[in-house]
Amino acid sequence: MSSILFTPLDVGPVRMPNRIAVSPMCQYSAVDGRANDWHLMNLMQLGISGAGLIMLEATAIEPQARITHGCLGLYDDASEKALGHVIESARRVAPEGTRWGIQLGHAGRKASAQRPWEGRGALGPDERPWITEAPSAIPFVAGWHTPREMTVDGITRVKAAFVASASRAARLGFDVVEIHAAHGYLLHQFLSPLANRRQDDYGGTLENRMRLTLEIADAVKAALPPEVALGSRITGTDWLPDGITVDEAATLAKALEQRGVAYVCVTSGGVAPARIPVAAGYQTHLAAEVKAATGVITRTVGMIVAPRQAEAVLAEGQADFVALGRAFIDDPRWVWHAAEQLDALDGIQYPPQYERGGARNWRGSALLRPREGAGRI
Ligand SMILES: Cc1cc2nc3c(=O)[nH]c(=O)nc-3n(C[C@H](O)[C@H](O)[C@H](O)COP(=O)(O)O)c2cc1C
């Protein structure tokens, strides 16, 4: 069987050896924005996974852009140096052709929060909170920090910070830079009428709400060398009556493409509490609608777990590639197992040190993961 999942994909100037991405996942483990041993372990582990694209977690463009005290940053020489050490090491052990991406973001009104394992709430007065900024002075939920309405000077500062971080990312050799415009963080706050009540050129109409994201895309694109792909994570729906719709997401995707954005990852939710119907592939229809309406290269994410499910999403043309998050935490060898199930073992590279434990050589893997049609052992 020939598998689409294990077929290369050109994302702008970047060739992915297969259509599997590790979804960006915050580790909340940095100190003053700087990567450390945890990031080294995590990225080395993911580096040998065989995924075509490994996205690093949401990385703050300035200190106050971090969600928590533990969020990764790429905003000064120290954070660049720390991340440089980690990414160079991870790249050295990863199979040739593995692509590396970094997600750049600003948390806006969701900044100054506790790490998930410390409560997930707004930082209290004795937890070194900081002043947050957002399009409008509306807290995320009652009891959260009330952000300052961002001034035009603040907007100018944020744009420059995105550009500076993207330039640092290019210097570190990242193949992909992704602008985070989803999950209720700053750019999503500008995009969604639920968080943006501005009366100026950055609020009101969709054109105005998209303005900041598009200006950042323009500026970052201009700063990146041509061999680096620019992408964006966008929201397909806020799951709330007056929130962003999938039609608006398609309009944004098209506008981003016109500015040189090579792909969009369509996700959802996060700008305000909502009931989200989480189930297998629960966001894939959003990617499919954006892709059908625009033709933009589209990544889908969200409870894509089984290899055959991922293969079907691509075979049906619902998206061009898939991202998996928690499945990679659960099983860092997901790619190897998917290749086994989809009869695509020729399409993956094991590190030679691990060759004897891979399904090409070790028939015990069929005992661990029995499947219909598996060979005798
Ligand atoms: C621990 C954790 C951290 C996450 N951090 C980020 C992040 O930094 N940026 C982002 O866009 N999404 C983040 N997400 C969301 C994932 O990228 C993904 O969209 C979500 O988990 C759904 O995919 P899944 O069902 O494959 O896990 C995070 C998810 C998890 C579980």
Image (cartoon, rainbow, N blue to C red):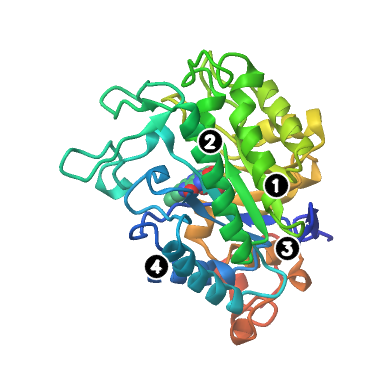
Q: Secondary structure at mark 3?
A: loop
- Report the residue at 74% width, 31% height from top: 255
Q: Which residue is mark 2?
A: 156
Q: Is residue 286 above or below residue 38?
A: above
Residue behind label 4 places its C-beta within 8 angstroms of ligand 1? no
Q: Earlier in the sequence, mark 4 or mark 2?
A: 4
Q: Which residue is mark 4?
A: 38
From the viewer's side, name the closer residue of 73 and 200.
Answer: 200
Q: CA distance from mark 4 to mark 2?
A: 34 Å
- Report the residue at 62% width, 14% height from top: 205
Q: Secondary structure at mark 1?
A: helix
Q: Amino acid at mark 2?
A: Thr
Q: CA distance from mark 2 to mark 3?
A: 59 Å
Mark whose residue sits in front, 4 or 2: 2
- Report the residue at 69% width, 67% height from top: 340
- Local packing at callout 2 (Cα closer than 10 Å; few below 14, some 14-19, many 20+) is some
Q: Amino acid at mark 1?
A: Lys
From the viewer's side, name the closer residue of 28 and 165.
Answer: 165
